[in-house]
Image (cartoon, rainbow, N blue to C red):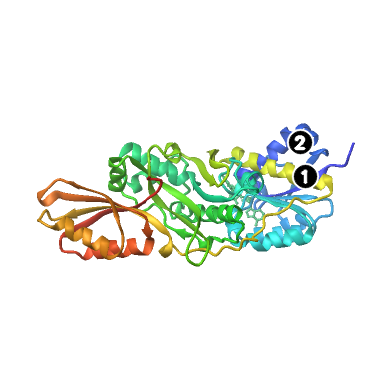
Amino acid sequence: MTAPLRVALLGCGTVGGAVLRLVGEQAADLAARVGRPVEVAGVAVRRPDRHPEVPAELLTTDALGLVTRDDVDLVVEVIGGIEPARSLIQAAIEAGKSVVSANKALLAEDGVALHAAAAKAGVDLYYEASVAGAIPLLRPLRESLAGDQIRRVVGIVNGTTNYILSRMAETGAGFSEALAEATELGYAEADPTADVDGFDAAAKAAILASLAFHSAVTASDVHREGISAVTATDVARAAEIGCTVKLLAICERVGGPDGESVAVRVHPAMIPTGHPLAAVGGAFNAVFVEAEAAGQLMFYGQGAGGEPTASAVLGDLVAVARNRVAGAAGAGPTAYAELPTRPIAETPTRYHVSLDVADVPGVLATVATEFARHEVSIATVRQDGHGDAATLVIVTHSAPDAALSATIAALREMPAVRGVTSVLRVEGLS
Ligand SMILES: NC(=O)c1ccc[n+]([C@@H]2O[C@H](COP(=O)([O-])OP(=O)(O)OC[C@H]3O[C@@H](n4cnc5c(N)ncnc54)[C@H](OP(=O)(O)O)[C@@H]3O)[C@@H](O)[C@H]2O)c1
């Protein structure tokens, strides 16, 4: 019998608890797949008294002591947040242990430095669970598509906001009402800021863009807008033009006079109901990838939850354990392309704009002139009603975001415009 590979588990909450249980339940299969038994050497938590499910001899509050122990080969970090997770992962890497993490916040902020440290130490750093939970996505980007050129990655990567937007579309509810329901049902945390303001999705977008475009992208490079300003009117207007509203993480390679760059953004957008992402309801996640040779690919599944996320963690654990058995480390991602990130102001997008206007002769021409003045071309325009309740619904062609924002600001100042009732970006319209 070969000696077991010993794993330090940092954190035993929603994900860590499921990892601990699955490692125990699947011990025989894991041993067969890895070529050596895999066992948990210790479990670091903050409050040991809250963990009767963990054998007492495994529990510790000394996470640093655990990761640097000589009898630990691999480290699984499922604490979350920046510190102490970063210091613990660094210490593990320096001590020659391969690391599996589910920590999107940390990888999006410090991925480059952590990868460099792992490469220097000759160990693995895998984090499939950090984006879209159970869905195999990072390894397909990193390995299966390594011979292709990825053009675009567009995803619904936050289940909480997708649940809220789905309920708004189904029931006509406003944002606050749908958020209250999501909180009540456990789909939203007591403090929902990270989800509804788009921080969580922005971290995931940074990780996806880094891998897809072989460039260093951090969360601060991502343009981020959440969903708290999405109104029932926006959702109703979307339905009128055959669209639905989703919070999208969009990573794209864009050409320009100064060469290629990477545009990464997270914002709510209208997408046609026929788009594959439109059918993604409730708390599910899905990511749509467009590559030069592969064409369009779609990844769909559970983006969160203890067991689904633990599935991705265990997949990584098997991968790093196999590498350890082989006496090697896998090739990490590279940032060789060094594409710069393009600011949102210069990024081409399309807008859907709904205006309440005075129904007087020439109003349509005045509004159209304002778009033209900012070099924004109009794709469609529709007028609903007349008299005091006239509404203009305009969908633009693609234009730099700054030109569109300036147009909206100018429209708000026009005497003929009584109100700008809905402004949302549109994606996926032909
Ligand atoms: N939950 C999901 O569905 C999901 C999905 C994808 C990715 N993730 C990622 O997975 C990670 C873990 O998430 P989670 O939902 O499992 O979190 P969680 O339920 O809050 O669990 C966190 C665990 O970390 C422990 N911990 C906190 N600070 C610690 C410290 N200083 N030293 C040692 N242990 C410490 C906690 O100990 P106590 O139990 O004693 O408090 C707890 O066991 C995060 O990076 C998260 O973003 C989660």
The Cα–Cα distance between marks 2 and 1, rounded to whole angstroms, is: 10 Å
The N terminus lies in quadrant: top right
Residue furthest to the right:
1
- Give 256 or 184, whichever is nearer the viewer: 256
* Residue drawn at the location 73% of the way across and 33% of the way down: 26
Which dot marks residue 401? none
Task: Verify CB contact (< 8 Å) between mark 2 and mark 1.
Answer: yes
* Residue drawn at the location 62% of the way across and 61% of the way down: 337
Mark 1: C-beta under 8 Å from nearest atom of ligand 1 = no
Residue 317 appears in view: yes
Q: Position of residue 308 (x, y in %)?
A: 60, 38
Q: What count of labels does the image hold?
A: 2
Question: What amino acid is found at the position of numbered circle 1 in the picture?
Answer: Ala
Q: Position of residue 276 (x, y in %)?
A: 45, 38
Q: Secondary structure at mark 1?
A: helix
Side (left or right) of 353 relative to 222: left
